[in-house]
Image (cartoon, rainbow, N blue to C red):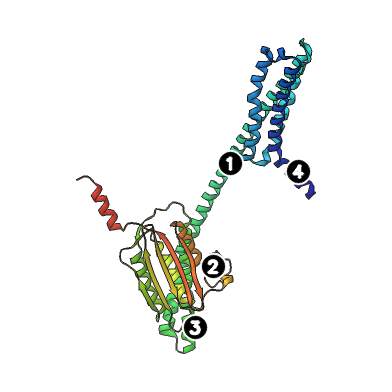
Amino acid sequence: MRWFADTDLASRDRIPQYVVGFGVALTLVLLGEIALYLALAPRFVFEGVFLVGVVTTIPFLAGIAFGGYWLRTGDLSPSRYPRVAGWSLAGLVGFLLVNLALIAVMPTESWAHVVSWSRWAVALGAGIGLLVGCLEGRAIERSLAAERASLRAEHAAEQREYLDYLNGILRHEVLNTATIINGYASLLYEEAATTDQQRRWAEVVIDESEEMSTVIDDVRILLQSTDGEWELEPVDVSRVLTDEVRKLEHKWEPVDVETSIPPNVSVRADQLVARVFGNLLSNAVEHNDAAIPHVAITVDPGPETVRIEIADNGPGIHDATLETLFDRTESHGSSHGIGLYLVRQLVTRYDGAVEVTETGPDGTTFTVELPAADSPSTASSNARSRSPS
């Protein structure tokens, strides 16, 4: 059965070649007729009826050959080829039968008239049938494309509604619950824990609730990033990085942070860009086994893009992990969680790029490239300078 299916598929794909070949064959028949009549009956070639038949046949021969070429190179699905060929064959047979009936009831002067008339009927019938088949095929394709687009739009609307609902649950229910857990665990740690073991248990609850809040925040931002209606604007990435470094030092003390951040460097993004660098900086420390984690941040502004490098002195990333580092994972045991997937999603949203440019036992370097933009103050100054006085 598989062999028959493959054979049928191969035959279907060769239909455009058959159509072109048929057009060429009819052209050769016409040329052969002319040569034969010139040799046997020269006067017939210059008769009005024959000349009119030749002139009216040529466009259809060209149309058949071009139709086969268009089938191969056009946007019509190969699944439509057999139906197009069927229309062409039906047109050929139907028009030929009608004209053969006319030949039978109408007197003809010679066999040459019969041959020329039949050839003319074949060319016109096949050409008109091919045209009808191509037009029908395109109409069907457009109808299916419109139907698929409508279904996609309907599905997208349903997904948007569902994501909005999920976002509301995360914001109002789960995150509030995580905050309450964190608050009571902190009270237990400060006021009720009397032994080191109890304090360690309280610390675990506090850490896990904070991690839950971080994951919920990332999921909420991911849901926001799926909304195609966002507006990019100049964002001071120097200020964003400075703020994220301050948060990093507050959360992960002790940590050694080295920065080379020129002032007033702006990129084309939105306020969610802070999550890109917040996640990368947290990863640089969280997965670092050094006694004192070291993080180096370098910003290299260019005319078209701004390049930001974040390097750490951690243990590096395994080759097997590198392949799926930025992928969405269903595994809760992933060492990088949802954070790096969020990073990739947001950077893509800004028409930028993020990659691991170096990794090994001496550390890992992440590089982010974002489109450069005028700083908000510069943009407003330029706008004022262009406005009429």
- Residue 119 at what x, y percent from top left? 73, 22
Q: Could you tell me which secondary element the residue under label 2 belongs to?
A: loop
Whichever of callouts 3 and 4 sits on the residue coming sooner in the sequence is 4
Q: Nearer the viewer, mark 3 or mark 1?
A: 1
Q: Residue at x 69, y 37 (%)?
A: 17
Give the CA distance from mark 4 to mark 1. 25 Å
* The C terminus: image quadrant: top left
Q: Could you tell me which secondary element the residue under label 4 belongs to?
A: helix
Q: Residue at x 27, y 54 (%)?
A: 380
Q: Which residue carries the number 1 mark?
A: 145
Q: Which residue carries the number 2 mark?
A: 325
Q: Nearer the viewer, mark 4 or mark 1?
A: 4
Q: Could you tell me which secondary element the residue under label 1 belongs to?
A: helix
Whichever of callouts 4 and 2 sits on the residue coming sooner in the sequence is 4
Q: Nearer the viewer, mark 4 or mark 2?
A: 4
Q: Nearer the viewer, mark 3 or mark 2?
A: 2
Q: Which residue carries the number 3 mark?
A: 201
